[in-house]
Image (tube, rainbow, N blue to C red):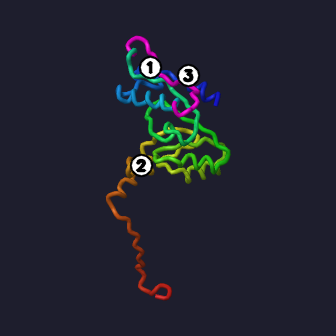
Amino acid sequence: MERALKRIKAIRQASPLEMSTMIGAQASKQQFDKIMSYLDLGRQEGAELLAGGAAATMEGDLSGGFYIQPTVFKGHNKMRIFQEEIFGPVLCVTTFKTDEEALELANDTLYGLGAGIWTRDLNRAYRFGRNIEAGRVWTNCYHLYPAHAAFGGYKQSGIGRENHLMMLDHYQQTKCQLVSYGIKALGIY
């Protein structure tokens, strides 16, 4: 966790027009206020604040922008900050003891757009990838978006699939028709 927090504290917030910028401002005051209310909610729920937790103060032309510090909370899966979509620079972490408990935590949500797995065990990577209820599961990476990859969610995240031949399934019915063109009878028929 210490290594992760060190990386989070090194995130560069600046103008989105600069190539070295890692996180820009929120798109609107409304979104900024929503995220800030979740930061307050996390504290009220008793989550431990490990990093961030406030508006980011920017200098010059960026002052007054809707910047929020990258934030990390430690808590449990029953907290609203774990269960609701914040859509901001907020990460909620918890602990688990077994693979089964980790899968239970991963699937204990109304949503299922994307998930990430980090492991050196290929068997575990495969099992988790198959069993996590999400439309896209990254293994040992996150947010790589090949143009041809299917995109869509499970549960209350997304409807159908986009960016893939799979999207055509919504406009057709699949049929399997097996035909023999042989003149002689096959088998017992």
Real-space Cα separation, disc 2 to disc 1, in angstroms: 33 Å
| Above-or-below relation of 130 to 65 | below
C-alpha separation, residue under disc 1 versus residue under disc 3: 12 Å
Image coordinates of residue 137 in percent, x first then y, are 52, 46
Tell me, yes or no, whether the highlighted magenta stretch contains residue 52.
Answer: yes
* Residue density around tag 3, few if under 14, some if 14–19, many if 20 or more, within 10 Å: few
As drawn, the label of residue 156 is: 2
Q: Secondary structure at mark 2?
A: loop
Q: Residue at x 43, y 48 (%)?
A: 153
Comparing marks 2 and 1, which lies closer to the viewer? 2
- Decide which of 149, 123 is in the foreground and name it: 123
Which residue type does callout 3 highlight? Ala
Q: Residue furthest left?
A: 171
Magenta stretch contains residue 123: no
Between marks 3 and 2 in the image, the one whose residue lies nearer the viewer: 2
Q: Which residue is mark 1?
A: 14
Q: Which residue is mark 3?
A: 10
Identity of the amino acid at label 2? Gln
Label 3 and label 2: CA atoms lie apart by 33 Å
Element type at mark 3: loop
SS state under label 1 = loop
As drawn, is 51 to the left or to the right of 110? right
Q: Residue at x 47, y 84 (%)?
A: 186
